[in-house]
Image (cartoon, rainbow, N blue to C red):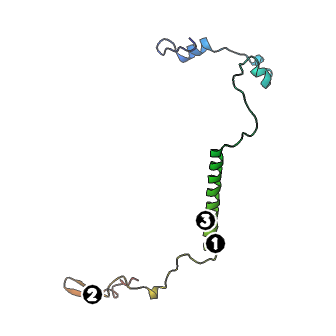
Amino acid sequence: PAFSFDLFSMTQADWLEQNVERISKDDLTETPTTAEALEGQPNTKAVTIGAAKATGSDIAYKLSHLLALVVAGVIALLASAALADGRSVIKLKDTSNLPRLTALTATLDGETINLKDHGLDYR
């Protein structure tokens, strides 16, 4: 068998000792060229180098990505134009123009309290 590893009968180190060829540093004098390294290897796949013709679906994918890129660019330009004038996009009113959020008076335990006198004057 190409690979039989019984965990109970031998350790990994023993298996490596039996199945891996040892090489010395003297065997590694030079790196083989690609042709030398592939010599004797079966060539089962044909490899075509160069650009393949795009099919209809490839063109659709590329056009959809291009459209998404254009839309993202337009959004970025519009957002930068809106923020470029230095003013806030949201206009805030001056506090004197805002309505009061608290009532002027409140009743606590049957007693009327002026909230403004107690520091509760929120706008």
- Crowding at dot 2, Cα within 10 Å, few <14 / some 14-19 / many 20+, comes out as some
User: Residue 22 or 1: which is nearer the viewer?
Assistant: 1
Helix, strand or loop at label 1? It is helix
Q: Amino acid at mark 2?
A: Ile
Q: Residue at x 63, y 15 (%)?
A: 20
- Rendering quarter of residue 104: bottom left
Q: Residue furthest left?
A: 110
Q: Is residue 31 visible?
A: no
Q: Residue at x 53, y 13 (%)?
A: 4
Q: What residue sits right under mark 3 in the picture?
A: 75
Write down the residue under mark 1: 81
Left or right side of 46 for 72: left
- Which residue lies at the image location 72% right of the left edge and 19% below the top edge? 41
**Crowding near the residue tagged with mark 3, few <14, some 14–19, many ≥20 C-alpha atoms within 10 Å:** few
* Picture coordinates of residue 19, whole percent (x, y): 61, 13
Q: Residue at 63% of width from left, 57% of height from top?
A: 67
Q: Give whichever of 36, 54 is nearer the camera.
A: 54
Q: Is there any visible trace of residue 56 in the rendered image?
A: yes
Q: Position of residue 121 (x, y in %)?
A: 37, 85
Mark pair 1, 2: CA separation: 50 Å
| Residue 114 place in picture, x, y as percent | 30, 88
Cβ atoms under marks 1 and 2 closer than 8 Å: no
Which of the image's four quarters has the N terminus? top right
The residue carrying mark 2 is 113
